Image (cartoon, rainbow, N blue to C red):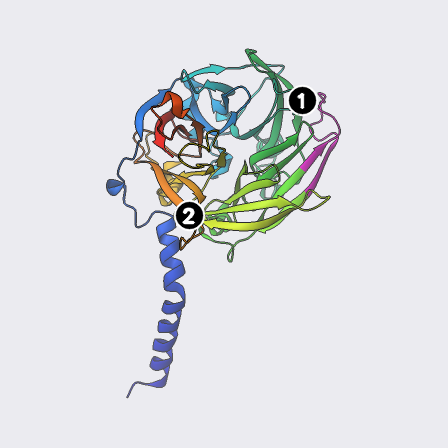
Amino acid sequence: MTPLPSLLALLTTTTLTALLYKPLSLRAELIGLWRPLHKIQAIHGQNLRFIPNTVQCEDLHHHRESNRLFAACQVEDEVQKRFAWFPPVGNFRDEGAAGRGVIVVVDPETFTSQHLDLSGFSGPFVTHGIDIYSPPTDPTSVYIFAINHLPNPAYYNLLSTSPSSPALKSTPKAHSRIELFYHTIGSPSATHLRSIHHPLIRTPNDVYATSPTSFYVTNDHHYREGFLRFIEDVGSQTVGPWTDTVHISLASTKSTPDASAGVNATVALSKIHNSNGLGHGATDAEILVTDCTGGVLMRTETLPSSTALKIVDRIYFPQPLDNPSFYLDPYPHVNGNASGYIMAGLARAIDLGHSALDPKGLDPVMVWHVKPAAAGASEPWEKKLVFQDNGTVIRTASIGVVVGIDPEKNRGRKQGWLFVTGFFSKGMVATKIDL
């Protein structure tokens, strides 16, 4: 006869195994544990191209009115610096490695790029998420909102003068903010209007602009470093729903020496796990938010007469998700409407802890095209893997953007150019995919 304590232990172990096996197995799949590097096969579409001078571009947006792509990147001769200072991955090794960022405009027809001269701006520019906004009445005007992860002078001054001060533990190493630029389509430059900071902007990841003086920004972590940040990374909406999306309104876009002047902030969406990318959805009312390491795309809408966001749907993926984008099919009358979400992310997020410090590392990627499923389908969404790479062609994929190809100029075929870029990538790639 089995002793009672042993029986209880067996029952407890069996029960816990039954309860935890599925969520732990799904979690292991999501972070890439069951996806070994050597088994990640190339899915590169057709006519793969490399866009010059597009180093470590974390975010990308299509300005449909001018058919130009806008990206936030780093300069070519400072590639190594990203691996010594990049707060979004918890890397604070060397504040002196805060590098020089650039705003890049890409022509999706010629596959060429142009670095904009940043008039009125100086100092480090550690780029991350961006968004662009054009007033409906003036599509040639573009306001560019770009995150900048600066070192925090308060922390490093204190470290220098009082290295044993208890205040160091509560003083963040980064002083992240948003830079606002103004650009006219066709111009070689963008003018820096002002910097934007608020205490509610803590670990900014991505931006969603609604006007020149109004935008949303995600905080991707509650804890910047340490064990609790690790819990956030491996957690879920059940374990670690500690991040939020904040709405910012500006009293003015005019330059001010105080980045917090005229800045008002309210929490628009709270208690979310690992809030990350923000994107424009199928309608003007739809705002996309991702739970990165949870692999969840949240479709949200603003509440009436409010800037608060309400989740209306969740779409789940077998991998982490970074920045979302939406492809609005300009040719819906040809072979069906291919409008849908383009979702990019890492195939093996489990490796990022060490690869984020290694300039020669490999970070494999996956990109999906997601659209409503046909009537009668078992699932509401049709998910198609349209791009995959083991990290040798492109390292990391933080966003994918599709630019449609006119079927009349493409032998009637329903295709688009998929542009993929990442925060550690040596350059943006473009490939033709079936839609």
Q: Nearer the viewer, mark 1 or mark 2?
A: 2
Of helix, strand and loop, which one carries label 1? Answer: loop
The foreground one among 328 and 293 is: 328
Q: What percent of the width, then of the height, locates residue 68?
A: 50, 20
Let me know if residue 220 appears in the view.
no
The single residue placed furthest to the left in the displayed view is 38
Say if 310 sits above or below 152 in the image. Answer: below
Q: What percent of the width, then of the height, locates residue 49?
A: 34, 22
Tell me the crowding category of disc 2: few under 14, some 14 to 19, or many 20 or more residues within 10 angstroms, Cα based.
few
Let me know if residue 156 appears in the view.
yes
Q: Residue at x 40, y 42 (%)?
A: 353
The foreground one among 188 and 10 is: 188
The single residue placed furthest to the front in the displayed view is 333
Q: Residue at x 38, y 58 (%)?
A: 24
| Range covered by the magenta-colored residues | 248-266
Say if 323 sits above or below 68 in the image. Answer: below
- Residue type highlighted by circle 2: Ala
The foreground one among 85 and 54 is: 54
What residue sits right under mark 1 in the picture? 137
What residue sits right under mark 2 in the picture? 374
Q: Residue at x 58, y 40 (%)?
A: 287
Quadrant the N terminus occupies: bottom left
Q: What percent of the width, then of the height, locates residue 215?
A: 64, 34
In the rendered structure, which disc, 1 or 2, sits on the residue that comes first in sequence?
A: 1
